[in-house]
Structure formats: structure tokens, C-alpha cells
Image (cartoon, rainbow, N blue to C red):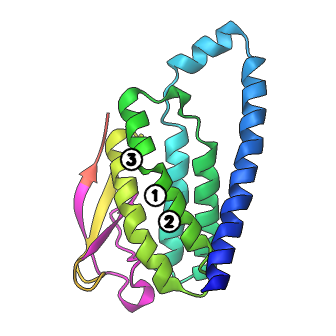
Amino acid sequence: MKYVISTVLGIAVFILSACNGNSEKKNSSAEAHTDTTAHANHTASAEPTIPGLFGQYGKLVSALSSDDDKEAVFAAQGLVKTLYSLDTTRFNAEQLKAYKDISASIEENGVHIAANLGSIQHQREHLVMLGEDFYDLAKSFDLGKPVYKIACPKFNDGKGAFWLSETKEIKNPYYGAKMPGCGSVTETITKN
């Protein structure tokens, strides 16, 4: 248990220190932009950053549906790294509130998944919470294409769980090869 806590704390410290270094670089480069560039940034959509975060989530779902805990670690690390790189200055008030409400949860669950190589069941438990967070993001941001909410009624001691996918194809990340087709599309999310 001490090893897991130490590993999680180590990853969190590493990521936070990397994040702090990146924010200083972003701030100095942002100051160098001309007024024209600043105006263009304010009129641009914030969505191009959120689809990248969803892409990392999709890699995580794919890794777990393939029973690949090692690839899940890499995907979770990419998810957390992408989370830290998002430029929230272009989010509108609704988007910023949604992001602030769930970004700490995405970070926590991503770090837990990354720290649990060899424990795919624990990784899958954290995917349940990530699914809820990403559902909230999908409702607040235009992803440019539909996202499908897919429910698995058996996982989580029969309480069920869901995940999001860019396709309607069922590849269950909670059971992997044991029950790859368990689930059904319950909602199509489009925000325009």
C-alpha cells in the first residue's frame, strides 16, 4: 500500500512540476503575441483542445477493452498531460464552470490508473468515474462529431457503468475479452 501511495504521489509531483514549467512558457510566449493574434485567439473556438482530451480518453477505453493494463497506464499519462495543457482562457462561462467542476476528478482518476500497472480491475473502477466526468464535458463542449454513451448493466456489482465512444461499436472496457459485446448505446451526444 505504501508503494502505491508513493508511486501516486511521485507521479502527481512530476506532473505538477512539469505543468508549472509549461505554464511559465505559455505566459511568456502569450505576451509576445501581437494585438491581432490576441484578437484571433479570443474569437477562436475552445473546442480544438477538448477533442484532444477525448482522444486520450478513447485510447484509455481501447486499452482496457483489450485487457492491456500497460497501455492503459500510457493512455492515462497522456490524458493527464493533455488535461494540464488545455488553454481554458477561451472557454465561455458555462464551459469553464463545467471544466473546473470536473478537472480535479479527471486528474485524480487518471493518476490512479497510471499508478496501477498490474491491477486492471482497479483501473476499470476509475474508468467508471472518468466516464461520468467525460459525459459532463461532452454535454458542455461541441466535439465536432457525435459521441455515444454506452451502458454496461453488469459492471460495478450490477449497478452498471457506462463509457463514451466515437463509434456505436461495442467494445466493453469493463470486461474486455471476457464480455466484449456487453453493452448498448443509450444516448447520442451532439452539441452544436
Task: Look at the image and tell me whether residue 47 can be seen.
Answer: yes
- State the image coordinates of residue 170 (x, y, percent, origin top left): 34, 72
Q: Residue furthest bottom?
A: 178
Q: Amino acid at mark 1?
A: Ser
Circle 3 residue: 137
Please name whichever residue, 40 or 145, is drawn nearer the observer in this view of the structure: 40
Real-space Cα distance between discs 3 and 1? 12 Å
Magenta stretch containing residue 110, yes or no? no
Quarter of the rendering containing residue 149 = bottom left
Circle 1 residue: 105
Q: Earlier in the sequence, mark 2 or mark 3?
A: 2
Real-space Cα distance between discs 1 and 2? 6 Å
- State the image coordinates of residue 16 (x, y, percent, origin top left): 69, 53
- Stretch of the chain drawn in magenta: 160-187
Are the residues flagged by discs 1 and 2 in contact, CB closer than 8 Å? yes
Q: Earlier in the sequence, mark 3 or mark 1?
A: 1
Q: Residue at x 77, y 25 (%)?
A: 29
Number of residues whose C-alpha sits closer than 10 Å to that of mark 2, classed few (under 14), some (14–19) or many (20 or more): many
Quarter of the rendering containing residue 87 = top right
Disc on res. 109: 2
Q: Amino acid at mark 2?
A: Asn
Assign a secondary structure to mark 3.
helix
Assign a secondary structure to mark 1.
helix
Q: Residue furthest top?
A: 35
Vertical relation: 171 (above or below) 119: above
Number of residues whose C-alpha sits closer than 10 Å to that of mark 1, classed few (under 14), some (14–19) or many (20 or more): some
Assign a secondary structure to mark 2.
helix
Q: Amino acid at mark 3?
A: Leu
> Of the residues tagged 2 and 3, which is closer to the observer?
2
